[in-house]
Amino acid sequence: MDTTLIFLAVLFASMAIGIPIAVSLLVSGVALMWHLDFFNTQLLAQNLQAGFDSFPLLAVPFFILAGELMNVGGLSQRIIDMARAFVGHIPGGLGYVAVFASVLLASMSGSAIADTAALATILLPMMRQQGYPMDYSTGLLASGGIIGPIIPPSLPFIIYGVTTNTSISKLFISGVVPGILMGGALLIAWRVVARRRQLPTAPRATPAERRRAVADSAWAIFMPVIILGGIRFGVFTPTEAAVVAAVYAFLVSRFIYRALSWKAAYDVLVASSITTAVVMFLCGAATVAAYMITLADLPNQLAELFQPILAHPTLFMACMVVFLLLVGTSMDLTPIILIFAPVCLPLALKAHIDPIYFGFMFVFTGCLGLITPPVGTVLNVAAGVGGVKMESVVKGVAPFLLVYALLLVLLVAFPQIVIAPVRWLG
């Protein structure tokens, strides 16, 4: 256990004094090297480079690029316009628009931050103008944003799959049903909020307006059909699907919707490159730490610690969920995957838990941390875009966090909700 304590102590101490997480991972890996009397700079560099020298990880920059192109090129706006044409007239209708748009956007970009920023930029000004409570409205948009990493394509599933050598296609399939359930849970919670606050309604769209909204958004809606259909029927791999998504988003934005100028396209490429560089450096640093974790035999040490509950899969899964919820309050999703997934998956296998189910639960639980204070990355994005105080957003997200927590309990108790669709569709 000394090795485990050294690794965790150095990691969290480095982050506590403000060192970036990627560098903290490198420092903790070096600390293990010194502890094991195995320091080798060449090995350090090789593992750092190997961390991002991966064909499946090529999906990350292309899905990031596709998400940026969707937001700048008008695809996100048309998805929201279509949802507003059909449900905008219901009391609190813009909240329902937000949920439906969240589910549709999730099937295109796979990024919680990108989806939240797009939704908040477009919908929050409308909600403020119509007198919606900004705390609950911002909380709803943040909660809808974390559906992005669950419904395929999903950047966290790609990173988890590469990190743990788990099938990315099956991880994608595992998120379909729970992602729809997340949308349903938000609809129920928002209905309760709308009834209590007596939220305003908008004029009902005419049949002609609805037909026009569907026609305008047809090219945007066709994007997830291409991505998911191509993966499901073996036309291309998830990595190739990312390239198809980026090219499709560019062609539609530039030549069909004509909303993407060449200057904007350049800005999108720069923004996507910066985001990609951050993610890839994290992956490389995590590979260094993972290599040293393997050499130090940390998974077996932890297996001995968890031995009393390994014979009870549901209890073990519940403990993992609580652990990940606690970690998620202070750490972003990508570092959680890179640091803890390689250690926790071997324990799950010893507990005879389906690896695809465990991978889904790992990412889903980590996503809840994105809207949980004090860090709450997605909460901060929604609050920043809407100009809402963080204290108000924390209050407003509470009912949506509650329904997500109930859904989490349901998924722990009934793993077949996740496993059955994977076996059927896979």
Image (tube, rainbow, N blue to C red):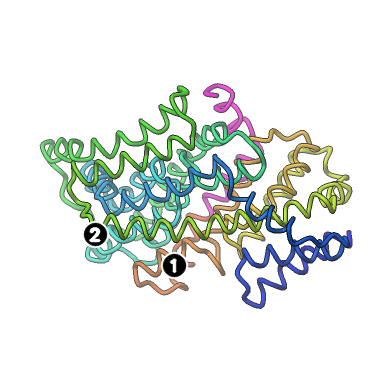
Q: Is residue 290 above or below residue 215?
A: below
Q: Earlier in the sequence, mark 1 or mark 2?
A: 2
Q: Is residue 352 above or below residue 392?
A: above
Residue range of the region highlighted in magenta in the rendering: 402-426
Picture mark count: 2
Tell whether 160 sits left or right of 120.
right
Amino acid type, residue under disc 2 in the picture: Lys
Q: In x, y percent, where is residue 309?
A: 83, 44
Q: Give the labeled residue for mark 2.
A: 263
Residue at image position (38%, 42%) is: 108
Q: In x, y percent, where is residue 255?
A: 19, 43
Residue at image position (43%, 71%) is: 392
Q: In the image, is residue 115 part of the stretch drawn in magenta?
A: no
Q: Residues within 10 Å of mark 2 (few under 14, many from 20)?
A: few
Circle nearer the viewer, 1 or 2: 2
Which numbered circle lies on residue 55? none
